[in-house]
Amino acid sequence: METNHYDLFVQRDMGIYVHIPFCKQKCIYCDFPAYQNLEEYYDTYIYALLQEITMFGDTYPKARTKLVDTVYFGGGTPTELSLSQIEQIINTIQRTYNLSNDCRFTIESNPGEIDISYLKGLQKLGFSRISFGVQTFNDKSLLSLHRSHNSKAAIDAVQWAAEVGFTDINIDLIYGLPKQTIEEIKENITLVSQLPINHISTYGLQVERGTRLYHLVEKELISLPDESLEDRMYETMMQGIQELGFERYEISNFAKNGAYSTHNLKYWQYSDYLGFGAGAHSFFEGIRRANNRNVMPYARKIDCFEFPIVDEELIDQQRAIEDYCFLALRTKWGINTTVFFEKFNVTLDSIYGSILQELIEKDLIVKDGKSYHLTSEGTKHGNYVFSQFIEG
Amino acid sequence: MSTKKIRNFCIIAHIDHGKSTIADRLIEYTGTLQKREMEAQVLDSMDLERERGITIKAQSVRILYKAQDGEEYILNLIDTPGHVDFSYEVSRSLAACEGALLVVDAAQGVEAQTLANVYLALEHDLEIIPVINKIDLPSADPDRVKHEIEDIIGLDASEAVLCSAKSGIGIPDILEAIVHKVPAPADKSDQPTRALIFDSRFDAYKGAIAYVRVQEGSIKMKDTIRMMHDKKDFDVTELGIFTPNLVPVQELPCGSVGCIAASIKNVADCHVGDTVTLADNPAPEPLPGYRKAVSMVYCGLYPTESKDYENLRDALEKLQLNDAALEYEAETSLALGFGFRCGFLGLLHMDVIQERLEREYNLTLITTAPSVNYKVYKTNGEMLEVDNPAKLPPPTEIDYIEEPYVKATTIVPKDFVGTIMELSQDKRGEYQSMEYLDETRVSVVYHLPLSEIIYDYFDKLKSATKGYASLDYELIGYKQSPMVKMDILLNGEPVDALSIIVHKDRAATRGRALAEKLKELIPRQMFEIPIQAAVGTKIVARETVKAWRKDVLAKCYGGDISRKRKLLEKQKAGKKRMKAVGSVEIPQEAFMAILKVED
């Protein structure tokens, strides 16, 4: 039977992600596409980026008609660009795609690298949500991560953003840093309580291959908190944030008063999103695409009017079901059996009945009405739970 | 047709002394195959064989050779396996020959394995032609090797052929030596037919195919053959010779080597070692000289997925056709479910079978720790043979236990004699004798428990002597030993498939080592898992696998779902080779952990 397999997923409006792979200084743990000292290539990159944005719309006319309700500038550090460069990008997006009236614009930034007038400018360009890579408010820890800011800069940045009218402010926090203490986590939480933010992303420090941190850990030049300390940091962080009235709506995301990151939710809720820029990812009409991570090869491809795609996967029904389950489980809403049936035209039980039962017995998931979601134990071991849904 | 122009021969050699390369050169030189058709080492046809550089199955090839006397001869080369585990396969191949090339490395000299095979060949009255290979190596010393052959084996080496198979030196000399020295098969074409099955294979279309050497009489198309051992008759559908590709022929005359297809559907009806005769004029007696393979090592083979049980049984059945030395019977384990107890010639044989099952039949298996066969004398006078530790009766019912002993002959450079003695002593060995083979090399004989040999003796020997030692062993009988069963408890539950039988003085050390190793191998799970080693009710070692740690909180960058998924797939793949025993997931390697512990 010939079906439009992607019809299954056309549920919500579309998101657009723009990747700016430049940083003043690369953090030692970072394995994202982010490069320092490339200032002379900014113009070339933006030229390519604009080209990619229009080229995609020309090639897939359907993408031009779909309603877009989130635009997200991530990095790297998008605020490395000048306001006029950002404006050019926004204009091109607006010309090419069908943005809704209430379309929400988010931008990531680093404290210490922006001032109040720049923030004002962003606000004027239409950004209402800003996300700061704070990581911690401890100056020693910040220095050891090669972050360019200190805690005062972080506090200033958040307060300025609120002053100029950003309605939604997120900060990223990391626990499990070298030499970090439980005390430091508690201090971070106290500071958070005094700041006008309504969203927190928090995650444990990961040592990824190919990073400077990996090298330092391998050579034993840096040591990370042991497992039991890291566990306590996790508990302290999770408990502390929730006690401040933040709701854990995704494994590592917390929001106050329902101020969810609607763009990021698209990843977990199986909506379409277009990704532009080096290393950006798209999911459009049942196809996942990944762009080349490197700036020059990315730009060169586009210069030849070719998409800089390095990976392209067609998501079939089986794969879609698996992806849907493990992504949905990351959120507090979990897998809703009715929504599942509507999307896939089979019951969740007929596919995963015994697996769900087993996970319930192991106290990793619970059934709550029509939904399955992770227990707190399941949240800690999400990867194990998710992997059960994958054929592999 | 006369047998005068036929020569049946094999090649015996130590591993790496160049047997397969010589075979290749003979085939190439005589134009049996064009050079472009030659894959390196034609005769090792299984992937596994080529990868490991060993011959597992006997192979044969017919070479046409126009000798210097102007006559054309049919040379049937029967390739033989070259590892200590496969001496039974060697014996079958030897019985199909009149002569043997004894290949000795010009630098390494005579090794223990060479000796063992030479003695086997002499038992079969084969004419032995010494061939000294690799004479172009800088370290080659053919004169010394000649002396060794004369002194150690007692063969006249004055006419030994000097060659280098790699560079093609001496290949014509080998062919001439075969023609002139190997006797032609006796012409017994007028006698009732008797043909030896020296190997067999299963073909999906033709059924079981018997590889035979016709000793007496002949076999023609449309004959009805009879398997003398099984007393079953079959109509011949195809006769063939190997060039080395199979070429159909109308007749396998007396003295020849070839194969028979006869719609033999049941694999068990084509036993290697059986004698083929004709139904209408049967020979009175089967051929002598074959001995049944003796299993030395036993282990349990279980499918990781219980649904694969039937597939495993079918696969074993098929492998058994090709491998007369493989024994198996169904067994059940509380921990692992339904599986098979299998008997092997040795550890390599076990390894090879496991790998073939996984590769050729696409099965994922769990192999339990290898064991030997113990004789357990019970207090009620009964004697039980036990090759599975789980089957050992409770200590109160046991009067005493006997374990198999081997005579192990090791040949080493003299500097390592101390090392060998220390190692053998440590492995409960009893010194028998020592003999200087020449100024530098010594043959040391020990009586050792077979269980120690299969445990890690061979590996230890190789590493302690930097690979210079060579080992051969033969079963000499049973001896009383204070053996006990050691159980392994995971999460408080004994796991029968992890039990081992061990000498009581070693139980504590081995228990500790095993528990430590299991701690390394068993991945962390939702809860803490105590690992205990126990002899009876006494706990001799304890370790703990900590509960797993958090594994989920990584940031998902910019919608990169594929990367997340790949991570999960990897995690899942790791789980595939695990077996859930009660609530504990145990990886495949854990069941073999005992082989990996250091004493």
Image (spheres, coloured by chain):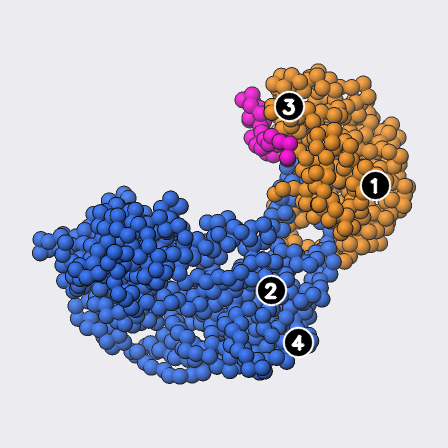
Residue at numbered disc 3: A4
Q: Is residue B266 left or right of residue B599?
A: left
Q: Residue at x 32, y 77 (%)?
A: B440
Q: Secondary structure at mark 3?
A: loop
Q: CA distance from mark 3 to mark 1?
A: 32 Å
Q: Subunit of mark 4?
A: B
Which chain is in orange here?
Answer: A
Query: In x, y percent, where is residue B36?
Result: 27, 43
Q: Subunit of mark 2?
A: B
Residue A45, placed above or below residue B376: above
Q: Secondary structure at mark 2?
A: helix
Report whether residue B191 is seen. Answer: yes
Q: Colour of chain B?
A: blue
Q: Are marks 1 and 4 in contact (CB under 8 Å)?
A: no
Q: Subunit of mark 1?
A: A
Residue at numbered disc 1: A368
Type of amino acid at the residue the image marks with label 2: Ala
Q: CA distance from mark 1 to mark 4?
A: 48 Å
User: Of the residues under marks 2 and 4, which one precedes in the sequence?
Assistant: 2
Residue at numbered disc 2: B497
What segment carries the magenta color?
Answer: A290-319
Q: CA distance from mark 4 to mark 3?
A: 65 Å
Q: CA distance from mark 2 to mark 4?
A: 16 Å
Label annotation for residue B536: 4
Q: Subunit of mark 3?
A: A
Q: Which of the image's four quarters has the C terminus of chain B?
A: bottom right
Query: In x, y percent, where is residue B1?
Result: 14, 54
- Extreme front residue here? B280
Q: Secondary structure at mark 1?
A: strand
Query: In x, y percent, where is residue B177?
Result: 17, 62
Type of amino acid at the residue the image marks with label 4: Gly
